[in-house]
Image (cartoon, rainbow, N blue to C red):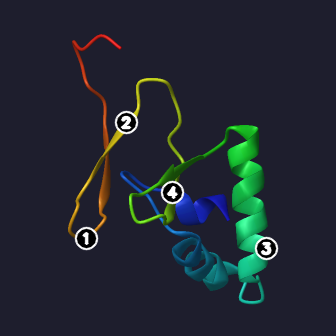
Amino acid sequence: MIDALAGQHVHLSAEQVHAGARRVVPEVSLATVYNTLNELVGMGEISEIRLADGTARFDPKVGPDHHHLVCERCGLTFDIEPRGVEA
């Protein structure tokens, strides 16, 4: 399932992860995907991003100097790493 999150600037919904996982394991359920994503978030292996509309996206990139830029129109989310900015 973690392979479904692979790539640069990947911020997928659980449904998008489910679609990717089903390409490998067709019988995987959406409930299993949600449970696995929540476990990975709890272990610190991925991060959960809550958008203004309440939807969640999951990001395989974690770390303290990692922020997000979100398009207010479409919700597309990008990683940004500000340099030279304190706190």
Is residue 25 placed above or below 10 in the rendered structure?
Answer: below
The residue at 38%/58% (across/down) is: 52
Label at residue 32:
3
Name the amino acid, label 2.
Answer: His
Q: Nearer the viewer, mark 3 or mark 4?
A: 3
Please report contact status of discs 4 and 2: CB closer than 8 Å, yes or no: no
Instruction: Name the quadrant of the C terminus.
Output: top left
Cα distance between the residues tagged 3 and 2: 28 Å
Residue 46 image point, x, y percent: 61, 46
Q: What amino acid is labelled 3 in the image?
A: Thr
Residue bearing mark 2: 67
Q: Alpha carbon of mark 4 to alpha carbon of mark 2: how far?
A: 18 Å
How many C-alpha atoms fall within 10 Å of the one at disc 1: few (<14), some, or many (≥20)? few
The residue that mark 1 highlights is 74
Task: Give residue 78's position: percent from left, percent from top.
Answer: 30, 50
Amino acid type, callout 1: Cys
> Viewer-proximal residue, 73 or 15?
73
Q: Is residue 69 left or right of residue 24?
A: left
Q: Are marks 3 and 4 in contact (CB under 8 Å)?
A: no
Mark 4 residue element: loop
Marker count (numbered)? 4
The answer for how far apart the CA atoms under marks 4 and 1 are is 21 Å
Q: Earlier in the sequence, mark 1 or mark 2?
A: 2
- For marks 1 and 3, give the CA distance: 27 Å
Which quadrant of the view contains residue 36? bottom right
Q: Is residue 27 left or right of residue 80?
A: right
Give percent across and percent down for residue 27: 78, 89
Label annotation for residue 35: none
Q: Could you tell me the amino acid type at mark 4?
A: Ala
Residue under pointer 4 = 6
- Work out which residue is located at the far bottom of the displayed protein and give it: 27
Horizontal side of residue 32 vs 56, given as left or right: right
